[in-house]
Amino acid sequence: MSLKERVVNSAPDFIVKFCAAPYVAGDTKEAAIKEADCLWQSRRILSTLDILGEELTSRDEVEKVVASYLAILDGLKGRDYATISLKPTQLGIYQSFDYCYDNTAKILDKAAEYKNFVTIDMEDSSFTDVTLELYKKLRQKYENVGTVLQSRLFRTEKDIEGLDGFQAHIRLCIGIYREPPEVALQDKKDMKEKLLIYMERLLEKGHFVAIGTHDEKLIHRCTELLQNNKVPAEQYEFQMLAGVPREKIQDELIQKNYTMRLYIPFAEDWKDAIAYCKRRLIANPNMGFYIAQNWCKRLLSKR
């Protein structure tokens, strides 16, 4: 365990909960939907809602999450500016592939009814094979489903080739999970270079790409590539995490008619929000600066 992992993991939960507030849209689906409404109405930003929590090992826990996602979709009815994201380890992959497939299909059926979209998030590399298998099987029946590829993994180039035969909807990001050097790049600069390469490759193959990054220099390189290649606007969008202070670049993209979407997590159990925030801090220590910046803004706004 690295020094920063030890420091973050040793932080008291109440402190992490306090710090997580700007990044987590409360502890109810109503709070998350309200956040999605606010983003759209005030800034014309799209969103994707995600229930925090993973690695569920009991069927009772899984069934509760499935019911929650179905309730979210009922709550989102008529809101074409908000989608949902979910994880295989929330939906029963530990029990069996078929059980996870059936649970995900149940959610996709409801989403299709409301003309909503579902993204199957990518977890650490031990789940990459099963997540792509799940996505491809679901894609045979459903149009309203996408998944995620991570530029840090060495295997991603072959995974892109494995999408040949259909138009995929891919969120492309560097990934947050720490991976061993045998399977992944270790330098973030290299990961970002690969993201640019993989974005172009996916677009050339006709896939939809949700470009997930907060790096402003990388975003500008992406927009330059998109403009030079005359990529249709309906073939891509930009995505970021709610709470990360990137309003300026977000507004810049919107003013230039780029589609912007924020990932809005919420926690039905705050232990999941705490675990989420710790992972984010470990992956990106700069979040400590963002947290301080957010709280300073809040304090100044109350004066």
Image (cartoon, rainbow, N blue to C red):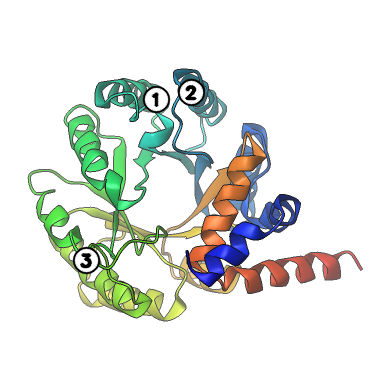
- In terms of image quadrants, where is residue 219? bottom left
Above or below for 136 versus 192 = above
The answer to whether residue 151 is visible is: yes
- First of labels 2, 1 by sequence position: 2
Tell me what residue is drawn at x 26 percent, y 76 percent.
Answer: 225
Q: Residues within 10 Å of mark 2 (few under 14, many from 20)?
A: some
In this rendered view, identify the residue nearer to me: 210 or 279: 279
Q: Amino acid at mark 1?
A: Ile
Above or below for 72 versus 188 = above
Between the residue at mark 2 and the residue at mark 1, the CA separation in whole angstroms equals: 6 Å
The percent position of residue 74, horizontal first and vertical second, equals 53, 24
Q: Residues within 10 Å of mark 1 (few under 14, many from 20)?
A: many
Label 2: which secondary element: helix
Q: Residues within 10 Å of mark 3 (few under 14, many from 20)?
A: many
Q: Amino acid at mark 3?
A: Tyr
Above or below for 82 versus 238 = above
Tell me what residue is drawn at x 92 percent, y 68 percent.
Answer: 303
| Residue behind mark 1 | 107
- In terms of image quadrants, where is residue 239? bottom left
Badge number at residue 70? 2
The percent position of residue 66, horizontal first and vertical second, equals 46, 23
Does residue 185 appear to the left or right of 123 in the view shown?
A: left
Label 1: which secondary element: helix
| Residue behind mark 3 | 198
Asked if the residue at tag 1 contacts the one at tag 2, i.e. Cβ–Cβ closer than 8 Å, the answer is: yes
